[in-house]
Amino acid sequence: MHPAAQPADSISLISKVSCRICQSELLPILDFGKMPLANAFLDQKDFEQEYFFNLATGFCSRCFMFQLLEQPAPEKMFHQAYPFYTRSSQRMVEHFKQLAETLKKFLYPGAFLVEMGSNDGTLLENFQGTGIECMGIEPSANVAAEALKRGIPTQIDFFGPQVAAQLAKQSDGADVLVAANCLCHIPDLASVFSGLGLLLKKTGVAVFEDPYLGEVLAKTAYDQIYDEHVFLFSVTSMSEMLSSYGFEIFDLEPQWTHGGSMRYFICRKGQREPSASVAAWLAKESEAGFKTLKPYEEFRKRVEISKVQLLECLENFKRQAVPVAGYAATSKSTTVLNYCGIGPELISFISDTTPDKQGKLTPGSHIPVVPPEIFHQANPKAAVLFAWNHAAEILRKEENFKASGGKWIHFVPKVQID
Ligand code: TYD
């Protein structure tokens, strides 16, 4: 049985109506209703045990953190059958190569680098043969096995004070801790920062990269909201949260990844001079009303409109008897498909390069996932681009689809046929 299909009472649901950072009451923003786990691709025989929770977001008016109201327990999401491999995108492989170059500015031969959520080792492999000591911490055993196969030291675990204390004992402490698209997945940030406090050298640096709330709002990218993304950080909320744990941001760099991310350079309070960009981003967010409910309420209205428009678009194709495919069975697509109520009657199949997803059905919506070869053979007239964040790579790769009359259906930043 798929680990995510275990009955709800075997692994408890973490339910929260108060802020995970400051315990204030959360103000509800958006309720997507009943939702499966974004990566729980399944077989027909597992339908009866399919797990659902209520996907809804809230905003803390005290520390300004945008977060899920409920989140399934981490063990339910990250396990030996987690189907997301970083190296499934060539552009991500290149991105991590560049990130490694940035990190090397804080490292030297003999230095110690720890990656939290190291996945298949795509980042750490760039340090092989450099004399920099590396350790990846990754709770999902199958993706960690890929890293181990490539000779990248990896411990299968969740990062927290225990793991940190053990690593600190084996070394003089970490010079750098890096986590890309990982921190936003962790509900218990107190445990992460208690670990970081134990492990990071006094002058050490932590680098986090996470989907940026400002981009989610600007692009109406509501599909970034799913079980794994318990937080969507802004510079404002990140800064408040870090301060409560004794850390601060000393620099920022926006990134293209995951549809628009922010890279945060972090140190212990007072250890480095913050760059001018930190104050500039805080001012920009303040002007945009990030500390008020207004931008989130406007976002909710745009999300509701987007749903109506996407359904109208797909129903139009159906009325004309034009079959529509999906492109990339992303985690994000689970939110779109289930929130909009789209199933195999509107999208006949979804093409995806991940072998672990192929032959399975999408969570909740039960659309078959097929390898790209089937997409090419079927040559559909229209396809919904679910991996819109990889549009540049995909549109280049799939030039023939357009050339032979195929239409891309986009829904971020708005519903559009191209
Ligand atoms: P990503 O947007 O990183 O997914 P998520 O929403 O889960 O973070 O996209 C990764 C998924 O997209 C993965 O299932 C592989 C698939 N994919 C393709 O099928 N073809 C492609 O060309 C690319 C880039 C991704």
Image (cartoon, helix red, strand yellow):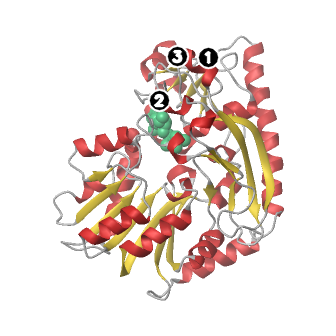
Residue behind mark 2 = 398
The three-letter code of the residue at mark 2 reads Glu
Residue 38's spot in the image, x, y percent? 58, 37
Task: Say whether residue 207 is visible.
Answer: yes
Q: Residue at x 37, y 72 (%)?
A: 199
The three-letter code of the residue at mark 1 reads Ser
Q: For the residue labelled by badge 1, is the local secondary structure a helix, a strand or a loop?
A: loop
Q: Is residue 15 above or below residue 284?
A: above
Q: Residue furthest front?
A: 10
User: In which quarter of the view is residue 383 placed?
Assistant: top right
Residue behind mark 3 = 379
Residue behind mark 1 = 348
Q: Residues within 10 Å of mark 1 (few under 14, many from 20)?
A: some
What's the CA distance linking mark 2 and mark 3? 11 Å
Of tags 2 and 1, the one toward the viewer is 1
Q: For the residue labelled by badge 3, is the local secondary structure a helix, a strand or a loop?
A: loop
Residue 103 left/right relative to 127? right
Of pointers 2 and 1, the one earlier in the residue sequence: 1
Residue 106 left/right relative to 3? left
Q: Residues within 10 Å of mark 3 (few under 14, many from 20)?
A: some
Of pointers 2 and 3, the one earlier in the residue sequence: 3
The three-letter code of the residue at mark 3 reads Asn
Of pointers 3 and 1, the one earlier in the residue sequence: 1
